Image (cartoon, grey):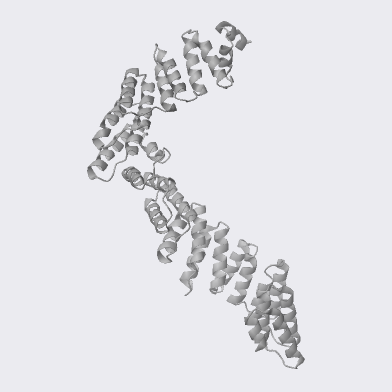
Amino acid sequence: MQIMAAANQNRFSACLEAAAKMKAAGLRPDASIYNALMGLAARSDSWLFSWAIVDDMMKLGIEPTATTFAHLIYAQRNRPYTNLWNAYDLLNQLGIQLTPPVYTSIIETYAAESNVEMMLRVFFAMKERGLIPELAAAQTLVSTLATTGHSRLAIEVANYFEEASTRQLEPKVWLECLTSSVDKLYEDGVLTCWPRVVDELNVLPPEGVCVGALNTAARAGLPELATDVLRVLKLAEIEWQEYHFAALIEAFCRNNQLKEALITLSIMRQNDIEPLESTTSFIYDIVKQDVDSLDLAWGLVDEIKESGSGLDIEALKVVLKAAVFLGDLQRAVGIYKAIPNYNLTPDLAIFNLLFQGCITAQHRQLGDLLLADMKAAKIEPNKETFEKLIYLALTQETYEDAFFYLEEMKAAKHLPPRKIYIALGDKCTEAQDPRADMVWQELRECGYRLDDPRVRLAARGVSEKRKTSEFSS
């Protein structure tokens, strides 16, 4: 009784002392006593004591049982595999059949070094014998498979065990399968594990796993999954972020649900989340494909407005941007003029997009009208605006305003980028405008390097004839 009590309390030294007193008193321990000692030795990782206990059993003529070997093998889990094989050889010599507990110890021994191949060989050996793994063995195998990146195998083993056994795996094991699946963007795995973890086991995955599930949903075009992940984030009191909705929008776009993707922009705004240019990138990629795609998107905008589903300025902006990309400036201007009809107000980004369209079409007059509208709306230009106004002026034969906007840009405390000086210098050189020297000089004063040989030579005042001779030599 003292030995059993000490074993239950994991007091290994007390067990050994009680066993020694028992033998000194001439009392013969039975197999249950030895197995209690073996179990404690295994849990204590006392591999050498476990062998000594087996030797003592056999000296007294007590036949080791399958339980004895289950403990013996488990005690060797942190030792070289030769210890495991020695225990296995002794088991075979004694003619003891492998039982599920013995298989469990073997699997857990291999799991200590994440030896997936050997763990699977043991698992399939059990299947061939018609043996169902113990819960501990199944969980160890599934967990090891999941954490080593074998998502599909982990889920297959988990499903097999729960179908063949009356036991169910612990929630943390299914969560590991889900984590492994989202790390691999394994669509089928996520679709299997997400409802199991969230709906059946009532577990709220951490944000990292939720983001992984969102990425999988985005990549595979699974908006229903992405929507459910957002629901779970809300339940977990994790604040929604822009990148959460960006994944949902991507999922809608990949699933050919452009209307829902456009509506999502309004939902973001309602939750005080500002859509970024990257948020609408997948919508833009669809709308800019051709004129038919642009027509479809414009029709969807009207449908959303009529249905009252919620229309955000970003939805109009992305359609306008696509019109500019396709060179349909008339459509872009039409969208701009229609913005007030949707109870929305154009912002600076809208004007910058329109200025880009004017540059492409070399339509200076329209640019002036848009600039007047912008000033009337009291929208202050930014660095990008000044750049586009300069480029627009440079599309004309008379480009004096380019220098005016350059000075305005500097007055607004914006450092003109190198490309602006290059464009101005090229225009002046082409027009044989002596102000080219001033442009190159100012470029150097701004700290820009003259890496371009053409610019470097022009900045030094080298004549066109001399440049030609230098390049040809």
Q: Image point 64% across, 85% down: which residue?
A: 4
Query: On the rendered image, what quadrant is the C terminus found in?
Result: top right
Q: How many marks?
A: 0
Depth order, front residue of 19/374: 374
Depth order, front residue of 231/319: 231
Q: Identify the residue at the far bottom of this view.
A: 26
Query: On the rendered image, what quadrant is the N terminus found in?
Result: bottom right
Whether residue 360 is situated above or below residue 458 in the rendered picture: below
Kindly tell me whether residue 399 is visible in this rendering: no
- 103 sits left or right of 214 in the view: right
Which quarter of the figure has residue 342?
top left
Whether residue 129 is situated above or below residue 426 in the rendered picture: below
Depth order, front residue of 238/165: 238
**Rendering coords of residue 113 (x, y %):** 65, 62
**Rendering coords of residue 235 (x, y %):** 40, 59
Q: Image point 37% across, 39% down: which residue?
A: 283
**Rendering coords of residue 21 (x, y %):** 74, 89
Q: Image point 39% across, 56% down: which residue?
A: 234
Q: Image point 27% across, 29% down: which residue?
A: 337
Kindly tell me whether residue 237 is visible in this rendering: yes
Depth order, front residue of 139/303: 303
Q: Identify the residue at the far left of this view.
A: 306
**Rendering coords of residue 453 (x, y %):** 59, 17
